[in-house]
Image: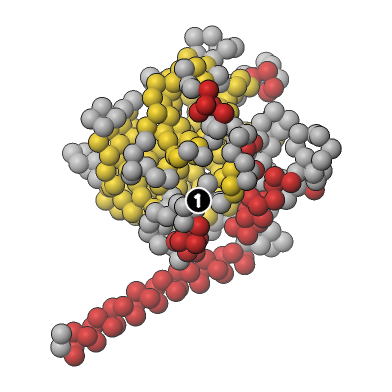
């Protein structure tokens, strides 16, 4: 290699390093700016209330069936002692629950509209250590796909929702999916009853490689993946790489969006109709660490996430000490740690701006926000929060 080539290589490497340092420096400044004591208090909702605080908590994901007016909630109080993403491995025997919430009903109390979903034909041993994270719902067929972070290893569980009796809905289990490419499934998008896009948030799993997983997070190494899964042909392939791949949603029939939590940004991809591969077309920078994504009927991208990771980390490491069960042991609920929330939307246009909808601690650790445009209703779930926040526009 000649001198000029070595100089060019050095300059290119230096440019890449400087770009990375600038990016990490920006995230550091964002963390300082978003300290809870300095965080702006924003509420763009016409009305809102926190419901079901005494019935459910630690709800990570939400999907709507707008035609029938219900939401499916993925909740896991056991996340306090078992969180494979945040690195909590105390006890895995307190399982999570999937719920159906009839949010459109205005004639009965919220508590009467909440239904735990029994898992029919799901083996008892798996049910005892069931830790649901992201879910994907296909309304026309009732298929529900669930990322399960069980202590025996991650799986994707396939159910069908039986809504024949709205007062006694249940889930019928069909199959358990495991695959080497699904080593850390986080969020899922059901393109059809048999076709999925699934994110793995890291290359190195926290339980097996704690140091490398933490390093991957902090340096924003693009070890996260998006996997295309065809359940009919049993074919799986990686179609994108990005740092801390998290929420995924379809913007339309040709494009989808994926959150990169530690960047923090959302990347828009064009879907190749033949190969199903993803081609990045746009990167949207935001002022918080995005968790999950959803798309409303008007094509707006709705994002929820975490403005201050140190606060969320404190909740993740100490929430198990709180006396949520009322046994008298542990810290009172009023002294539980708090982590702020951030909910925003983007109109889908390259020139469009991100509009903040909610920023604050009244409802903390926001992980998903969904909107029913026709009814003017939205729901926010909290990774380590009691109940859900329901807003009206």
Name which residue lies at 33% across and 44% down.
181
Name which residue lies at 52% across and 66% down.
27
**Camera-side residue: 83 or 376?**
83
Q: Which residue is mark 1?
A: 207
Name which residue lies at 70% across and 45% down.
320
Locate the C terminus by quadrant.
Answer: top right
Residue 189 percent across, percent down from the top left = 39, 36
Q: Is residue 358 visible?
A: no
As drawn, 131 above or below 339: above
Residue 165 percent across, percent down from the top left = 54, 9
Looking at the image, what colour scheme do you see? secondary structure
User: Does residue 265 appear to the left or right of 362 in the view shown?
Assistant: left
Name which residue lies at 80% across and 34% down.
326
Locate the N terminus by quadrant.
Answer: bottom left
Q: Is residue 202 visible?
A: yes
Residue situated furthest right in the rendering: 328
Residue 24 percent across, percent down from the top left = 48, 69
As drawn, 126 above or below 315: above
């Amino acid at each position: 290699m000649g001198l000029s080539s070595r100089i060019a290589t050095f300059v290119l490497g230096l440019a890449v390093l400087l770009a990375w340092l600038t990016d990490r420096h920006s995230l550091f400044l964002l963390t300082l700016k978003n300290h809870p004591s300095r965080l702006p208090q924003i509420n763009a909702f016409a009305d809102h209330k926190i419901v079901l605080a005494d019935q459910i908590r630690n709800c990570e994901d939400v999907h709507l069936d707008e035609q029938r007016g219900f939401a499916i909630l993925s909740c896991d109080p056991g996340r306090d002692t078992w969180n494979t993403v945040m690195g909590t491995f105390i006890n895995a025997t307190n399982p999570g629950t999937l719920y159906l919430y009839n949010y459109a009903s205005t004639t009965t109390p919220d508590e009467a509209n909440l239904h735990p979903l029994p898992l029919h034909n799901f083996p008892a041993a798996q049910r005892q250590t069931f830790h649901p994270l992201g879910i994907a719902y296909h309304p026309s067929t009732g298929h529900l796909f669930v990322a399960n972070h069980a202590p025996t290893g991650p799986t994707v569980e396939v159910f069908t929702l039986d809504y024949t009796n709205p007062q006694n809905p249940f889930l019928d289990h069909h199959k358990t999916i495991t695959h080497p490419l699904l080593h850390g499934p986080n969020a899922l998008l059901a393109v059809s009853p048999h076709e999925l896009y699934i994110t793995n948030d890291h290359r190195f799993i926290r339980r097996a490689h704690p140091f490398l997983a933490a390093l991957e997070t902090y340096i924003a190494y693009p070890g996260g993946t998006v996997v295309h899964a065809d359940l009919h042909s049993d074919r799986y392939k990686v179609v994108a790489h990005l740092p801390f791949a998290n929420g995924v949603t379809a913007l339309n029939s040709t494009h989808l969006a994926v959150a990169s939590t530690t960047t923090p940004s959302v990347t828009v991809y064009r879907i190749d109709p033949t190969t199903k591969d993803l081609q990045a077309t746009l990167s949207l920078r935001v002022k918080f660490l995005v968790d999950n994504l959803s798309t409303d009927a008007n094509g707006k991208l709705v994002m929820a996430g975490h403005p201050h990771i140190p606060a969320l980390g404190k909740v993740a490491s100490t929430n198990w000490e709180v006396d949520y069960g009322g046994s008298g042991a542990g810290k009172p609920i009023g002294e539980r740690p708090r982590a702020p929330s951030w909910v925003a939307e983007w109109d889908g246009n390259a020139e469009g701006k991100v509009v903040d909808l909610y920023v604050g601690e009244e409802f903390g650790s926001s992980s998903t926000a969904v909107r029913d445009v026709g009814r003017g209703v939205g729901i926010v779930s909290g990774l380590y929060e009691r109940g859900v926040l329901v807003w009206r526009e």
